Amino acid sequence: MALYSEKVMDHFNNPRNVGVIEDADGVGEVGNAKCGDIMKIYLKIDGDIISDVKFKTFGCGSAIASSSMATELIKGKPLSQALELTNKAVAEALDGLPAHKMHCSVLAEEAIRSAIKDYYDKNGIEYDKTRFPDPHEEEEHHFEDD
Ligand SMILES: [Zn+2]
């Protein structure tokens, strides 16, 4: 049964950019209670460009594949573009995720935002706070399959 696309399997079996950046400019850590996934992302920022990115994910296969794909999508890109990365874009780049695993791809998006916010905070850079909503306030999902 092909529940997962070949790309998901590839990124799960052979994840890109796994590891830690010791002198990272921004670090973001998020978790989700549903699968118990925890994701930590490290960014090295050069001017406005993400020159390097590494991640560690303690999580399910979809969370690992999503973080791997997300790091590939933001590496070498300006911060403004990384902030626009959505979990939908990550899932599309993976040729789709099963509906009940979409929440795992949200983690990658949130971890990247949180790492960029960390960078802004550490460097006293002004930013539009409305672009960084508290993730806990957004948890009011309705579960259609309940
Ligand atoms: Zn998960």
Image (tube, grey):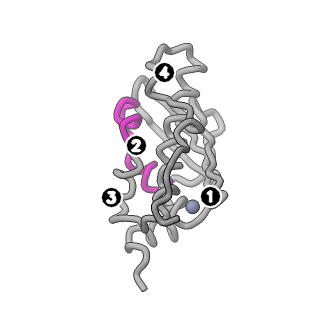
- The residue tagged with tag 1: helix, strand or loop? loop
Magenta extent: 67-85
Which residue occupies 36% across, 37% down?
84
Q: CA distance from mark 4 to mark 3?
A: 27 Å
Q: Nearer the viewer, mark 4 or mark 2?
A: 4
- Give the residue at mark 4: 129
- Give the residue at mark 3: 92
> Residue 4 at x, y = what percent?
42, 74
Left of 3 or right of it: where is 44?
right
- Give the residue at mark 1: 34
Under mark 1, the amino acid is Lys
| Magenta run includes residue 77 | yes
> Residue 86 at x, y = what percent?
39, 45
Q: Nearer the viewer, mark 3 or mark 1?
A: 1
Which residue occupies 36% across, 64% down?
96
Question: Which label belongs to residue 47?
Answer: none
Question: Crowding at label 1, few (<14), some or many (≥20) Cα neighbours within 10 Å?
Answer: few
Between 119 and 133, the one lying in front of the other is 133
Which residue occupies 48% across, 30% down?
45
- Give the residue at mark 2: 74
